[in-house]
C-alpha cells in the first residue's frame, strides 16, 4: 500500500510545491512508484510537471466534489511521476463540500482505489487550513512541513501542529509528523543558521535535510520539469535526493 505523505503549511511562498514535485522525481529515481496529487487551486504542481491547467478536463475538484473516479484523471508526466492535476475549478471545493456528509473523508475516499498502484502518494496542499487541507491530513500517513528559514515563516506553524493534533483526535489517530523541511536555506547568513538551529527545540519534531536557496528552482517550472531534470548536478537537486533518501528511511 502507498505511503500517503501530505506537504502542508498555510503560509505561501515556502517552497512547498517545489518540494513536492522534486521529492516525487527523486523518489522515482530511486525506483519508487509515485503519484503527486495537486490540491491547490493555483495548480502550481500541475504546471511544474509540464501540464497546463487550462488543458485539464478532469481535476481534483471533480474527484472530491462530484465523486469522479481518480484513475480517470491521472496524467503521466515526463518526470516519471503520475499526476492528479488541479485547476482553478478547485477553488470552490471547500464551499461545495461544506454541506456534504462525510466531507472530511473526501480526499481519503478519492485516493483509496489507487493505494495499491503506488509506493508514494504525495499531497500538495493549498496554503490554508480549509476542508480540503484537513481532508488531506485525514487521508495521510504522515505530514511534512516545508518551512522557509526566516522568522516570519514560523507564523502559523503552531496552528498547523494544533490542527494535526486535532485530526489525530477525531479522525486519524495514526497521523505522524515526518518532520520540518527547511527550505530556501542560505547557510552564509547568521539569521538562517540561527533559525535552523532553533527548529528542533521550538517545535519538538524531526528536522529533515535542508534545501539550499537556488535560482535553479525558479527556472525549472518554465520548462515544465523539476530541478532534477533541468539542473541534475545542482546543489538543489542533490538536496532533494538527500531528502528523498531521508523519507525512505523514516
Image (tube, rainbow, N blue to C red):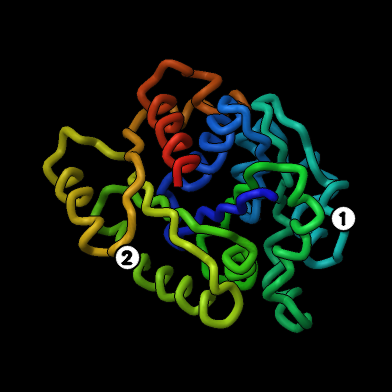
Residue 116 percent location from the top left of the image: 76, 48
Residue pointed to by mark 1: 69
Q: Residue at x 68, y 28 (%)?
A: 80
Mark 2 crowd level (few <14, some 14–19, many ≥20, 10 Å Cα): few
Q: Is residue 218 left or right of residue 222?
A: left
Pinpoint residue 216: horizontal percent, then vertical percent. 43, 25
* Residue 215 visible, this orientation: no
Kindly indicate whether the residue at mark 2 contacts the one at mark 1 (C-beta within 8 angstroms).
no
Residue located at (52% from left, 81% from top): 169
Q: Is mark 2 on a helix, strand or loop?
A: loop
Whether 72 is drawn above or below 109: the answer is above
Q: How crowded is mark 1: few (under 14 residues within 10 Å), some or many (20 or more)?
A: some
Q: Which residue lies furthest to the top in this view?
A: 233
Vertical comparison of 229 with 125: above or below: above
Nearer to me, 151 or 245: 245
The residues tagged by marks 1 and 2 sit, at their Cα atoms, a distance apart of 37 Å
Please report whichever mark, 1 or 2, sits nearer to the chain's N-terminal start. Answer: 1
Residue 186 lies, in percent from the top left, at 24, 36
22 lies above or below 3: above
Question: In x, y percent, where is residue 7?
Answer: 51, 53
Question: Measuring 32% from the left and 65% from the top, which residue is drawn there?
Answer: 155
Quadrant of the image occupied by residue 202:
bottom left
Give 236 or 32, whichever is nearer the viewer: 32
| Label 1 vs label 2, nearer the camera | 1
The answer, for residue 35, to whether it is visible in the render is yes
Quarter-of-image position of residue 205:
bottom left
**Mark 1: secondary structure:** loop
The single residue placed furthest to the left in the displayed view is 190
Which residue bears the numbered disc 2?
155
Amino acid at each position: 500500500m502507498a505511503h500517503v505523505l501530505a506537504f502542508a503549511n498555510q503560509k505561501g511562498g515556502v517552497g512547498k510545491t517545489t518540494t513536492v514535485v522534486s521529492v516525487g522525481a527523486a523518489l522515482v529515481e530511486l525506483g519508487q512508484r509515485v503519484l503527486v496529487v495537486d490540491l491547490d487551486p493555483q495548480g502550481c504542481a500541475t504546471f511544474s510537471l509540464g501540464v497546463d491547467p487550462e488543458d485539464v478536463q478532469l481535476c481534483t475538484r471533480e474527484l472530491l466534489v462530484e465523486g469522479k473516479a481518480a484513475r480517470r484523471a491521472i496524467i503521466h508526466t515526463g518526470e516519471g511521476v503520475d499526476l492528479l492535476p488541479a485547476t482553478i475549478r478547485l477553488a470552490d471545493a471547500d464551499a461545495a463540500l461544506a454541506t456534504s456528509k462525510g466531507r472530511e473523508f473526501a480526499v481519503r475516499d478519492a485516493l483509496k482505489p489507487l493505494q495499491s498502484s503506488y509506493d508514494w502518494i504525495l499531497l500538495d496542499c493549498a496554503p490554508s487550513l480549509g476542508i480540503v487541507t484537513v481532508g488531506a491530513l485525514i487521508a495521510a500517513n504522515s505530514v511534512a512541513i516545508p518551512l522557509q528559514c526566516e522568522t516570519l515563516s514560523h507564523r502559523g506553524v503552531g496552528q498547523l501542529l494544533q490542527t494535526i493534533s486535532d485530526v489525530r483526535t477525531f479522525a486519524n489517530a495514526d497521523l505522524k509528523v515526518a518532520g520540518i523541511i527547511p527550505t530556501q536555506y542560505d547557510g552564509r547568513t547568521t539569521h538562517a543558521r540561527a533559525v535552523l538551529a532553533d527548529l528542533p527545540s521550538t517545535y519538538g519534531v524531526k528536522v529533515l535535510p535542508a534545501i539550499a536557496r537556488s535560482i535553479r528552482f525558479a527556472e525549472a517550472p518554465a520548462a515544465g520539469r523539476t530541478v532534477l531534470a533541468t539542473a541534475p548536478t545542482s546543489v538543489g537537486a542533490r538536496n532533494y535526493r538527500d531528502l528523498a533518501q531521508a523519507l525512505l528511511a523514516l
